[in-house]
Image (cartoon, rainbow, N blue to C red):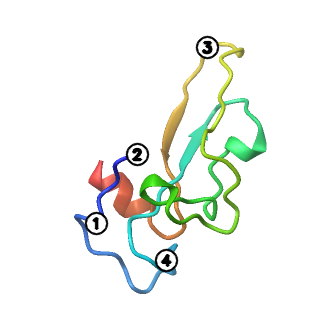
Amino acid sequence: NHLPSSHILPWDPTISPATPKRGGIPTVVHLHGGIHEPTSDGHADAWFTSGFRETGPKWTKTTAHYENNQQPGNLWYHDHAMGLTRVNLLAG
């Protein structure tokens, strides 16, 4: 992954975000509507920074696994890092 080192939007200091000690922008993929293992669910504290330099307390693996064995439906994925979901969604 090639995440930037600083965010393009300001963070809200009143919301406790994921805070990597060495900088970087934390992110984690969260999928709505999927049938998948819990470790691929994108827990808000399972974040990571670019190159997996830092990881959150619930992070377990570098690759999320989503099998494609369910009926067609509406699936939606987005970033789910603690306290940063809003600004990361707005940033695209």
Q: Position of residue 17 (x, y in %)?
A: 49, 75
Name the residue carrying label 1: 7
Residue at the (60%, 61%) spot, across then down: 44
Kind of residue indicated by mark 4: Thr
Q: Quadrant of the N terminus?
A: top left
Q: Earlier in the sequence, mark 3 or mark 1?
A: 1
**Within-10-Å neighbours for mark 4: few <14, some 14–19, many 20+:** some
Kind of residue indicated by mark 1: His
Kind of residue indicated by mark 2: Asn
Q: Residue furthest right?
A: 37
Q: Position of residue 33 (x, y in %)?
A: 63, 32
**Label 3 – label 2 distance at C-alpha:** 28 Å
Q: Earlier in the sequence, mark 1 or mark 2?
A: 2
Instruction: Report helix, strand or loop for mark 4.
Output: loop
Q: Are marks 3 and 1 in contact (CB under 8 Å)?
A: no
- Single out the mark in the foreground, 4 or 3: 4
Residue at the (66%, 32%) spot, across then down: 65
Name the residue carrying label 4: 19
Of residue 22 and residue 25, the one placed in the foreground of this image is 22
Q: Earlier in the sequence, mark 4 or mark 1?
A: 1
Residue at the (49%, 70%) spot, across then down: 83
- In the picture, the disc for residue 1 is 2
Q: Earlier in the sequence, mark 2 or mark 4?
A: 2
Name the residue carrying label 3: 72
Lateral position of residue 32 relative to residue 39, left or right: left
**Label 3 – label 1 distance at C-alpha:** 35 Å
